[in-house]
Amino acid sequence: MVLSSPAKDFGGWSALVMAPDGKSLLAISDEGHGLSADLLYDGIRPRGLTRARLGPLLGQDGRELDRKVDQDAESATLIEGTLQRGTLLIGFERRHRIDRYPIRDGEVQPPTGTLKLPAEAKRIRTIRASKP
């Protein structure tokens, strides 16, 4: 399955969370956006998405993350509940952190906090890819 969209905020997916039943997904981009959708299948093979929603991740103030240093998500995991109502952890690089995001009615809400990282995390460097 190949996904495409004319939306300017589509792409750069760094994290993917699948519902345990395989019927829905949540993807997080390294530009600070989330894509939620239900999957369509041909037998056991995914063939497309339906009910897709694309929107920005929000900061604790409820506003869009507007700086690359704050937007650069690289990982996500559902730690409780479902993609309709649960809790998601999203890991970020550049400004290294793991934020806790509630999900309500299938929409990722502003984060409720940031996990305390070990002291060693302050030594994490961001490695930039070299251009060919």
Image: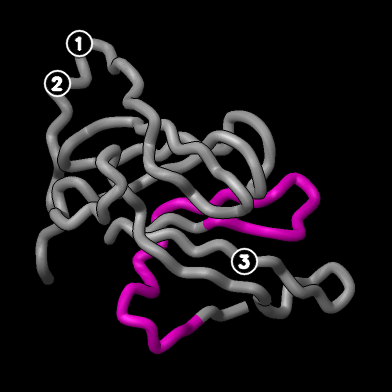
Magenta residues, dominant SS class: loop
**Residue toward you, 109 or 11:** 109
Most distant residue in the right direction: 43
Q: Are marks 2 and 1 in contact (CB under 8 Å)?
A: yes
What amino acid is found at the position of numbered circle 1 in the picture? Ala
Question: In front: mark 1 or mark 3?
Answer: 3
Query: Relative to 77, is 45 above or below?
Result: below
- In the picture of the structure, the residue carrying the numbered disc 1 is 119
Crowding at mark 3 (Cα within 10 Å: few <14, some 14-19, many 20+):
many
Left or right: residue 21 compared with residue 125 = right
Please provide the residue range marked out in magenta. Answer: 4-26
| Residue 27 screen position, x and y as percent | 50, 58
Q: How many angstroms separate mark 3 from mark 2 (CA)? A: 35 Å
Quarter of the view holding residue 114 = top left
Q: How many angstroms separate mark 1 from mark 3 (CA)? A: 37 Å
Residue at 31%, 46% in the rendered image: 62
Residue at 38%, 71% in the rendered image: 11
Left or right: residue 80 compared with residue 8 = right
Could you say whether the residue bearing mark 1 is in a helix, strand or loop?
helix
Could you say whether the residue bearing mark 2 is in a helix, strand or loop?
helix
